[in-house]
Amino acid sequence: MKSMMIVALVSGFAFTLNAQSVDGKELFVKKCATCHSLTIPQDKSKMKAPPARGVMFHMREAFGSDEKIKAHILDFVMDPSREKAICKSVKRFGVMPSLKGKVSQDELSVIADWMIKNLQMNQAEHQKMQGK
């Protein structure tokens, strides 16, 4: 009986460590980069969605705080709508499909934290991306 409890505790501890060690960039690439590139593509006609840095630029403008940005990501990715869309490029690309069942809330939280910390774009870079 004791050995079964020890195995269960060790397994639970290992699962917790594994969940915490998941890399946000790795998850982004796996779950999001199919549509949202991490770089500004040379051939913009092949884009499926706006680049991730551009999306983050608009979210920073709209929400200001990291907490509000994260809350928006957690909501929008699971239940997207035109009314909730922040980027004007929704006119070009349409509303993204819901990722319910394709990404967990825990994974999305890790992705959002990584995006907030790592995806920066200033006004000049944003204008260059738009070809201005």
Image (cartoon, rainbow, N blue to C red):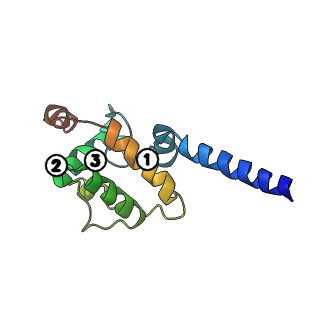
Q: Quadrant of the N terminus?
A: bottom right
The image quadrant of residue 47 is top left
**Tag 3: residue type?**
Val
Inspect this view and state whether residue 35 appears. no
Picture residue at 48% right of the left edge, 59% below the top: 105
124 with respect to 86 (left or right)? left
According to the image, label 1 marks what residue?
111
Where residue 41 appears, as percent x and y from the top left, is 34, 34
Nearer to us of marks 3 and 2 is 2
Query: Amino acid under label 1?
Result: Ile
Find the distance from the CA under tag 3 to the CA under tag 1. Answer: 14 Å
Q: Which mark is residue 61?
A: 2
Q: Nearer the viewer, residue 105 or 99?
A: 105
Mark 1 or 2 closer to N-term? 2
Can you give x and y, in whole percent of width and height, for residue 103 in the image? 51, 57
Q: How many marks?
A: 3
Residue at the image position 32 percent from the left and 59 percent from the top: 71
Residue holding disc 3: 55
Amino acid type at circle 2 is Glu
- Of the numbered discs in the image, which one, if any, rests on residue 79? none
Q: CA distance from mark 3 to mark 2?
A: 10 Å
Q: Residue at x 31, y 38 (%)?
A: 119
Q: Nearer the viewer, residue 43 or 99?
A: 99
Question: Is 44 above or below relative to 76?
Answer: above
**Residue density around tag 1, few if under 14, some if 14–19, many if 20 or more, within 10 Å:** many
